[in-house]
């Protein structure tokens, strides 16, 4: 998720009760500041990381959100290309500014903008993962597989932007919307958590970090203050929009129950895990950049990944990683192969199994969602799992319908990018995509094990 979630209702609520504004963190002014921060951050990254048109990004991502039609006239954003920044205001006030830094995406100005650090290691990294496709677009090899992609791009599944289907280590089909290419680094939102889980695994294998204390963070059983929904006054939106040191704020939240005893959706918990990664590799953003690209992204050939950081140099591993659809398919392949690629082990043995092991009575594992029966109620109001997909499927999921789906029994990885403004980002359609692809592969006389 990101702090632009339900931005329209947030702004509408702030406008409706503006006369009651005070100086507390529960005032409409607080909410409107969170909202303009979300706009400036999202649009800055859309333009300078993903190469999108700023007005189109606003129309597709911001305007459709619930309640935005009530106050669209009161929101103003300004793109400054020479200074590589976006400013936003609401009703003439509550200004925010997000600034692009080379190789590090955009950062909200909360009083300090640290300089950019090198985005890549000094020496080129040779990937150990064999290439999953050639340089050209991989078109479906059968009408049935083509039909599966056509269905994924049907308007009934709002604004699909990219689909990549990888089977047995090779891309067998892919398609992109007219405004994207296979080279577009897209906002993965909470699929970033899957990459954070992988970075912890790399460090654990290297003996540089003990993963056991982080397990409650990766499983969202940290036991801190309960999640209250993305309404502008919750811990997550405050952390993203107002706190220069996100992990310090996440740590400061009150402990309510012992770790490991209660599941609750937690972006702040993943910021604490991100800080543990930062500290284990040297303590600075430059250290994180060198480590992540040398030891994980570079070795997988994930060449377009951009990690955004807070002002304290901690990667925003809860939600703010970018990459191409093929990049994320490569991460899925790493998990499909239980952390081993090209004859080299990057993750501990059974790390992928740990990711796909059910946490308490939920449909969550560690860094990934599961397709298993769950007795608890989802805190965000949509169903657990992927209806119609095999029981062993597990998936990274991000706001607005970003999916990284791994199906071990089928040797299958599917990535879907989109801008789906319905709750759950189209879980039913995602499950149908998986089922359609499996059926298409079977009809091609491919032995799907």
Image (spheres, rainbow, N blue to C red):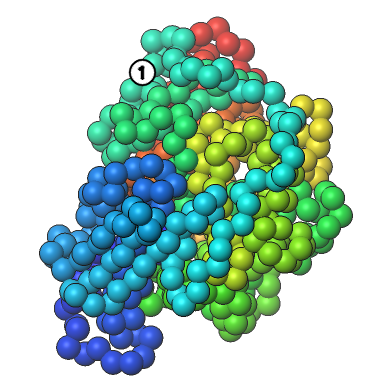
Q: Residue at x 37, y 33 (%)?
A: 180
- Report whether 385 appears left or right of 144: right
The part of the image, by quadrant, that contains residue 407 is top right
Q: Quadrant of the C terminus?
A: top right
Residue placed furthest toward the top: 445
Residue 81: tell me if it is visible: yes
Depth check: 92 or 201 in front?
A: 92
Between 71 and 116, the one nearer to me in the picture: 116
Residue found at the far front of this picture: 82
Placement of 194 over or under 236, stated as above or below = above
**Residue 431 rendering spot, x and y as whole percentages:** 44, 35
Q: Where in the figure is residue 76, as x and y percent of width and height? A: 21, 64
Q: In what element is the residue under mark 1?
A: helix
Residue sitting nearer the eye, 160 or 216:
160
Q: Residue at x 31, y 57 (%)?
A: 80
- Image location of residue 391, percent across then percent down: 57, 37
Query: For mark 1, does the 10 Å Cα neighbourhood hold few (<14), some (14 to 19), or many (20 or more) residues?
Result: some
Which residue is at the front of the view, 291 or 396? 291
Residue that appears at 76% across and 59% down: 281
Which residue is label 1 attached to?
147
Coordinates of residue 333 in the picture (x, y in percent): 64, 32
Q: Is residue 236 left or right of residue 90?
A: right
Image quarter where the N terminus lies is: bottom left
Q: Residue furthest right?
A: 207
Q: Can residue 334 be seen by looking at this rendering?
A: no
Please tell me whether residue 352 is drawn above or below residue 300 in the rendered image. Answer: below
Q: Residue at coordinates 76% horizontally, 48% vertically from top-left? A: 202
Task: Examine the rendered structure and indicate whether residue 121 appears above or below residue 408.
Answer: below
């Amino acid at each position: 998720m990101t702090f632009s979630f339900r931005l329209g209702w947030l702004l509408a609520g702030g406008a409706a009760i503006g006369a009651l504004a005070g100086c507390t963190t529960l005032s409409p002014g607080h909410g409107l500041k969170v909202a303009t921060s979300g706009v400036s951050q999202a649009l800055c990254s859309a333009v300078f990381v993903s190469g999108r048109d700023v007005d189109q990004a606003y129309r597709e991502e911001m305007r459709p959100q619930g309640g935005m039609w009530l106050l669209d006239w009161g929101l103003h954003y300004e793109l400054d290309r020479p200074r590589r920044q976006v400013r936003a205001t609401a009703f003439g006030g509550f200004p925010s500014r997000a600034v692009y830094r080379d190789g590090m995406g955009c950062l909200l100005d909360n009083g300090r903008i640290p300089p950019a650090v090198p985005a890549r290691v000094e020496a080129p990294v040779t990937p150990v993962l064999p290439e999953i496709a050639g340089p050209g677009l991989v078109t479906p090899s059968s009408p049935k597989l083509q039909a599966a992609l056509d269905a994924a791009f049907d308007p009934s599944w709002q604004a699909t932007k990219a689909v990549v289907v990888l089977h047995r280590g090779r891309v067998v089909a892919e398609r992109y919307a007219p405004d994207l290419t296979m080279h577009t680094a897209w906002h993965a939102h909470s699929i970033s958590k899957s990459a954070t889980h992988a970075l912890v695994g790399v460090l654990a294998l290297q003996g540089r970090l003990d993963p056991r204390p982080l397990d409650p963070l990766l499983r969202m059983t940290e036991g801190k203050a309960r999640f209250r929904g993305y309404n502008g006054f919750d811990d997550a939106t405050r952390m993203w929009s107002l706190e220069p040191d996100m992990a310090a704020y996440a740590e400061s939240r009150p402990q309510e129950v012992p770790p490991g005893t209660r599941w609750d959706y937690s972006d702040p918990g993943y910021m604490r895990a991100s800080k543990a990664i930062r500290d284990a590799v040297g303590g600075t953003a430059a250290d994180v950049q060198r480590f992540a690209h040398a030891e994980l992204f570079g070795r997988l050939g994930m060449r377009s990944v951009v990690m955004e950081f807070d002002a304290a140099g901690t990667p925003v591993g809860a939600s703010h990683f970018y990459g191409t659809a093929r990049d994320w398919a490569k991460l899925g392949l790493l998990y499909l192969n239980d952390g081993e690629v090209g004859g080299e082990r990057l993750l501990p043995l059974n790390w992928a199994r740990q990711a796909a092991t059910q946490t308490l009575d939920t449909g969550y594992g560690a860094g990934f969602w599961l397709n298993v029966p769950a007795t608890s109620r989802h805190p965000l109001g949509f169903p657990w799992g992927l209806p119609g997909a095999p029981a062993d499927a597990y998936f990274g999921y991000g706001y607005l319908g970003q999916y990284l789906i791994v199906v071990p029994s089928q040797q299958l990885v599917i990535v879907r990018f989109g801008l789906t403004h319905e709750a759950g980002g189209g879980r039913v359609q995602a499950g149908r995509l998986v089922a359609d692809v499996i059926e298409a592969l079977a009809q091609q006389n491919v032995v799907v094990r």
